[in-house]
C-alpha cells in the first residue's frame, strides 16, 4: 500500500462537525460534569473553567482554561472534547492544539485578545468553530478557515431570543444569496465584507460549506427543538444544563428534543418534571449596560 | 419493481450525507427516528456520529427491536464508523466483529487516504477516517473487504456491511452502490420465496 494518508484536510476538519450533527455539545467545568454529559447522550463536551453565566457574573478577564482541567476532562470521557480560545489569541489555540483537543471554539464568551483580527485557522491542524450573528460574520470566519459555524446568541442568559435572531439572519442571508445572479455576487461579497469565493460557493449550493449549529441561550427542550426547526444542525448548550436544578435529567431531555425536534409529543414528554431551568436574563438590560458578548469580534 | 426503500437512522450523526448519496443512486430514502419509521425498509443505514449518543438514542426511542427485526428478516444493514460500532458484538450484535473505538486516535490523527476495497472494482476509494474505530476481532464467517495499517476497516457479515470510515463524505458512491446491490439481491430473494 503506497497510499499517502493526508491529515487536517478541509474534509477531515468539517467531517467531525458532520458527525456531531443532530447532537448536543455541552459545556462542562469538571470531569464529573463531563461524565454526566456523556451519560446523558452528549455528542461532545466543551471544557471550560466557568460556564458563561458565571463568567458574566464574575466579570474580569476570561481566558483559556487551565490545561490540567482540560486533560482531566479528556481522560474522563470518550466523546470529542472541545475547548475555547480567546478571539485572536493564536497562542492559546496553539496550546489547545498541543493538548490535542478535538475542536477549538474561538469564542466571544472569553475576553477578546485582538480587536482587529481573528485567528488564522488555516495555520492549525485542529479544526475551529466560530460564532456568528449574521451571514457576513459566518462567511468571514469560513474565509479564515473555520470548519464549523454556530450562532452566537447571547451566552449565559438562558434567553434564546438572540440565537433565534442570529439563526434567522444567517438562513435568510443564505436564501438571498442563492437568488442572486452571478454578476451580483461581487457586490454581495462587498456588502457582507466576505471573500467572493465563499460567497459564490454559498450562492451556488444554497448552504454554508460547513455545518451550522446553534449556541447561546438554550435552556429548555423546547428551545432546542425551536432552533433545530429554524435550521440549526445541532445545539451547543452552555449554562443551560449545569445551572439548572436537575442537570442529568435536563441534559437527557435536551438531547431527546434535539433528535426528535419535529415530534412535539416526544418534546412534551421530555419536558415533564425537569425542575427549574436556569434563571434567565433580559437582553435589553444587558444592552443598556453594554454587556453583550455577541458584539465581540464581528 | 418499485425503487428501493432505504432508511437512514437519524438519531445523531452524519445521516444527511448518507441521504444525499443514496438519493443520488436512485433510492427512496427516509429518516428513521422511531420504530414505525423502520417498517417496510429494504435496507437500513446506521451512520457515523458518536456511538454512545446513537446507542442511547436507539434505547430511548425503543428502536432496538425494530432494527433487530429488520436484520432477522435478512434485510441489509450498512454501518459506517459509529454505525459499525453499533452493529458489533458489544452493542446490537448484528455483525460478528468487535470494534475498537477511537482506535486511530483523536481528531488530530484523523486522515483521508486512497483505500483499495474488495467488491467495488480496482480503483481505490477516498476514505475519510474521523476519530475512527477499527475491527479488532472478527468471526470466521466475516469477509474483510479492506484493511489499513494492519487492521480491518471494512467487512461484510452476511447482510451486514460495515466500514470504519466515511464513504458518505466523499463523492465516490461505489460502497453505497454495493449496499444497494445487496439490498436489491435480498429483496429479489424475498420475492422468490414468497412466490414458492
Image (cartoon, rainbow, N blue to C red):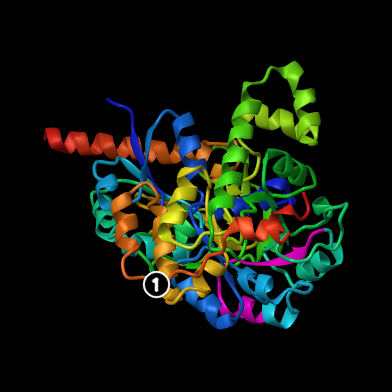
- Is residue B155 visible in the rendered structure shown here? no
In the image, which residues are magenta?
A: A71-87
In this orientation, which residue lies closer to the viewer: A100 or A182?
A: A182
Whether the magenta-drawn stretch holds residue A75 is answered as yes
- Residue carrying label 1: A249
Q: Percent x, y for residue B119?
A: 49, 42
Residue at figure coordinates x 62%, y 48% from the top left: B127
Which chain letter goes with mark 1?
A
Based on the displayed image, in which of its 4 quarters is residue A153 positioned? bottom right
> In the figure, A187 relative to A279: above or below?
above
> In the figure, A10 relative to B172: above or below?
below
Element marked by disc 1: helix
Whether the magenta-drawn stretch holds residue A266 is answered as no
> In the figure, A91 relative to B10: above or below?
below
Residue at figure coordinates x 50%, y 65% from the top left: A42
Q: Percent x, y for residue A106?
A: 74, 59
Amino acid at each position: 500500500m503506497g497510499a499517502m494518508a493526508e491529515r487536517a484536510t478541509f474534509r477531515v476538519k468539517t467531517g467531525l462537525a458532520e458527525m456531531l450533527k443532530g447532537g448536543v455539545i455541552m459545556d462542562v467545568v469538571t470531569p464529573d460534569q463531563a461524565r454526566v454529559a456523556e451519560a446523558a447522550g452528549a455528542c461532545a463536551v466543551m471544557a471550560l473553567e466557568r460556564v458563561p453565566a458565571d463568567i458574566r457574573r464574575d466579570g474580569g478577564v476570561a481566558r483559556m482554561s487551565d490545561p490540567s482541567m482540560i486533560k482531566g476532562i479528556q481522560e474522563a470521557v470518550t466523546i470529542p472534547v472541545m475547548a475555547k480560545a480567546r478571539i485572536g489569541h493564536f497562542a492559546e489555540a496553539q496550546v489547545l492544539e498541543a493538548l490535542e483537543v478535538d475542536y477549538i471554539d474561538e469564542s466571544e464568551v472569553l475576553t477578546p485578545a485582538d480587536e482587529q483580527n481573528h485567528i488564522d485557522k488555516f495555520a492549525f491542524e485542529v479544526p475551529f468553530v466560530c460564532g456568528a450573528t449574521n451571514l457576513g460574520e459566518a462567511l468571514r470566519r469560513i474565509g479564515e478557515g473555520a470548519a464549523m459555524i454556530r450562532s452566537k446568541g447571547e451566552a449565559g442568559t438562558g434567553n434564546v431570543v438572540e440565537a433565534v435572531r442570529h439563526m434567522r439572519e444567517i438562513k435568510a442571508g443564505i436564501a438571498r444569496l442563492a437568488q442572486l445572479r452571478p454578476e451580483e455576487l461581487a457586490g454581495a461579497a462587498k456588502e457582507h465584507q466576505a471573500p467572493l469565493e465563499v460567497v459564490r460557493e454559498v450562492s451556488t449550493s444554497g448552504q454554508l460549506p460547513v455545518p451550522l449549529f446553534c449556541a447561546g441561550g438554550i435552556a429548555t427542550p423546547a428551545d432546542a427543538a425551536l432552533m433545530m426547526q429554524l435550521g440549526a444542525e445541532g445545539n451547543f448548550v452552555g449554562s443551560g444544563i449545569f445551572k439548572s436544578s436537575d442537570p442529568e435529567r435536563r441534559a437527557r431531555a435536551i438531547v431527546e428534543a434535539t433528535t426528535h425536534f419535529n415530534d412535539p409529543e416526544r418534546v412534551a414528554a421530555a419536558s415533564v418534571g425537569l425542575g427549574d431551568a436556569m434563571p434567565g436574563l433580559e437582553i435589553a438590560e444587558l444592552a443598556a449596560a453594554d454587556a453583550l458578548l455577541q458584539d465581540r469580534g464581528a | 419493481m418499485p425503487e428501493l426503500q432505504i432508511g437512514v437512522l437519524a438519531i445523531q450523526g452524519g445521516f444527511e450525507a448518507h441521504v444525499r448519496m443514496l438519493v443520488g443512486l436512485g433510492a427512496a430514502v427516509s429518516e428513521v427516528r422511531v420504530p414505525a419509521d423502520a417498517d417496510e425498509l429494504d435496507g437500513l443505514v446506521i451512520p457515523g456520529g458518536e456511538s454512545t449518543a446513537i446507542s442511547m438514542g436507539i434505547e430511548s426511542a425503543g428502536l432496538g427491536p425494530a432494527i433487530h427485526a429488520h436484520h432477522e428478516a435478512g434485510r441489509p444493514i450498512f454501518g459506517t464508523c459509529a454505525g459499525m460500532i453499533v452493529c458489533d458484538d458489544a452493542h446490537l450484535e448484528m455483525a460478528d466483529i468487535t470494534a475498537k473505538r477511537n482506535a486511530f486516535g483523536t481528531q488530530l490523527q484523523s486522515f483521508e487516504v486512497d483505500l483499495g476495497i474488495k467488491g467495488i472494482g480496482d480503483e481505490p476509494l477516498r476514505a475519510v477516517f474521523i476519530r475512527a474505530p477499527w475491527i479488532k476481532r472478527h468471526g470466521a464467517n466475516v469477509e474483510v473487504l479492506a484493511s489499513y495499517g494492519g487492521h480491518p476497516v471494512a467487512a461484510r457479515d452476511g447482510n451486514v456491511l460495515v466500514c470504519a470510515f466515511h464513504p458518505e463524505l466523499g463523492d465516490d458512491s461505489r460502497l453505497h452502490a454495493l449496499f444497494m446491490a445487496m439490498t436489491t439481491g435480498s429483496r429479489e430473494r424475498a420475492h422468490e420465496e414468497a412466490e414458492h
